[in-house]
């Protein structure tokens, strides 16, 4: 009779080897999710967009690192969500997670990472106090503005009532006449013109006329239209040349003396005056 182990005694060891082989053949949770994602033709970005799970958490879970999940409760939720996104049954993976991490844990408080995602703005009722203060300020401002307008209108009325007929009998006009940059010299000024120069004054007495004036070098002094009542005075060291577009409308004064010429209305005259004139050249 041989002494040794019976076949029945060897079976437990065989069962342990079979279980160990099965454990080695079964991929990890992260590996299973990664393989299913690749088989479905999805990227990590695709899965993150579809599940609202951050990309860094997806990468960590596929590397079997569940520390970024914020606790077992959230780790299980992420595993379930990712498994459904890659068309994988989540129950075997959850059971595997329980075997590897000590069964179903008690609920843990939410980590700040997930609390930030679940925060929703709190609805608040209307702030009646602020609304009443704003209304009161608006009413005070309106009343002050109305009183200010009333004072202004009263002042205007007083000013209007203060003007008497005697005041209006001698009105004073405050309209400023435009200053002539080069005032025309008077007759006395023309008469007192230096003898070593020629001075010619052109006055549009009877209508409009085009005037052109040149100095002794032929340089244009003036080229424009004189309206009725306008005058222009020209001086030169030796000679002034004139072209009158309507000579009949013009009065001429040369060296302080009026030129007595009966120009025909509408006629064009070309005239030249020197220091020794008033005779037309």
Image: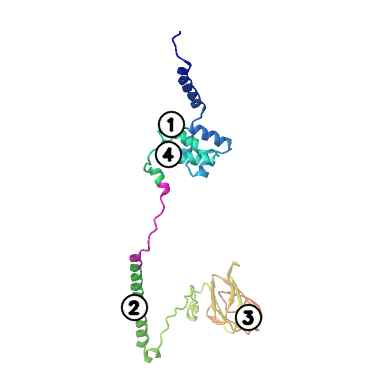
Q: Mark 4 or mark 3: which comes first in sequence? A: 4
Mark 3 or mark 2, which has the lower sequence index? 2
**Residue 105 vs residue 58: left or right?**
left
Q: Which residues are magenta?
A: 116-131
Looking at the rendered image, the disc whose residue lies closer to the viewer, 1 or 2, is 1
Q: Secondary structure at mark 2?
A: helix
Q: Which residue is mark 4?
A: 69
Q: Mark 2 or mark 4, which has the lower sequence index?
A: 4
- Hey, which quadrant is residue 134 in on the image? bottom left
Mark number, residue 247: 3
Q: Which residue is mark 1?
A: 100
The front one of 159 and 269 is 159
Mark 1, secondary structure of its residue: helix
Q: Secondary structure at mark 4?
A: helix
Give 45 or 240, whichever is nearer the viewer: 45
Asked if residue 262 is positioned above or below residue 19 in the image, the reply reads below
Residue 227 visible to the viewer: yes
Q: CA distance from mark 4 to mark 3?
A: 107 Å
Residue mark closest to the camera, 4 vs 3: 4
Residue 147 tag number: 2
Q: CA distance from mark 1 to mark 2?
A: 83 Å
The percent position of residue 24, horizontal first and vertical second, equals: 50, 25
Marker count (numbered): 4
Task: Please say if the residues under marks 4 and 3 sit with CB atoms less than 8 Å apart.
Answer: no
| Location of residue 90 in the rendering, given as x and y in whole percent from the top left corner | 50, 38
Secondary structure under the numbered disc 3 in the rendered image: helix
Q: Nearer the viewer, mark 1 or mark 3?
A: 1
Q: Is residue 55 at all visible to an observer of this figure?
A: no
- Is disc 1 in contact with disc 3, using a CB cutoff of under 8 Å? no
Q: Is residue 127 magenta?
A: yes
Residue 134 relative to residue 247: left or right: left
Identify the residue shown where x is 50% and y is 44%: 51
């Amino acid at each position: 009779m041989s002494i040794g182990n019976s076949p029945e005694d060897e079976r437990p060891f065989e069962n342990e080897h079979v279980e160990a082989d099965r454990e080695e053949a079964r991929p990890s949770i992260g590996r299973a999710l990664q393989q299913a994602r690749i088989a479905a033709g999805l990227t990590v970005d695709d899965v993150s967009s579809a599940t609202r799970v951050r990309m860094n958490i997806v990468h960590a879970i596929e590397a079997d690192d569940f520390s970024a999940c914020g606790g077992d409760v959230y780790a299980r939720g992420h595993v379930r969500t990712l498994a459904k996104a890659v068309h994988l049954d989540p129950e075997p993976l959850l059971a595997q997670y329980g075997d590897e991490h000590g069964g179903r844990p008690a609920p843990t408080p939410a980590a700040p990472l997930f609390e930030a995602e679940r925060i929703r703005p709190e609805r608040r009722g209307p702030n009646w106090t602020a609304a009443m203060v704003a209304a009161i300020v608006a009413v005070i401002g309106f009343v002050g503005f109305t009183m200010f307008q009333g004072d202004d209108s009263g002042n205007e009325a007083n000013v209007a009532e203060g003007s008497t007929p005697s005041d209006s009998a001698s009105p004073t006009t405050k309209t400023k006449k435009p200053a002539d940059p080069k005032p025309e010299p008077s007759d006395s000024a023309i008469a007192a013109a230096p003898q070593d120069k020629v001075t010619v004054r052109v006055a549009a007495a009877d209508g409009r006329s085009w005037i052109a004036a040149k100095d002794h070098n032929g340089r244009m002094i003036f080229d424009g239209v004189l309206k009725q009542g306008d005058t222009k005075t020209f001086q030169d060291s030796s000679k002034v040349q004139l072209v009158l577009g309507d000579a009949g409308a013009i009065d001429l004064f040369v060296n302080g003396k009026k030129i007595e010429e009966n120009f025909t209305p509408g006629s064009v005259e070309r005239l030249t005056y020197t220091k020794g004139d008033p005779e037309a050249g």
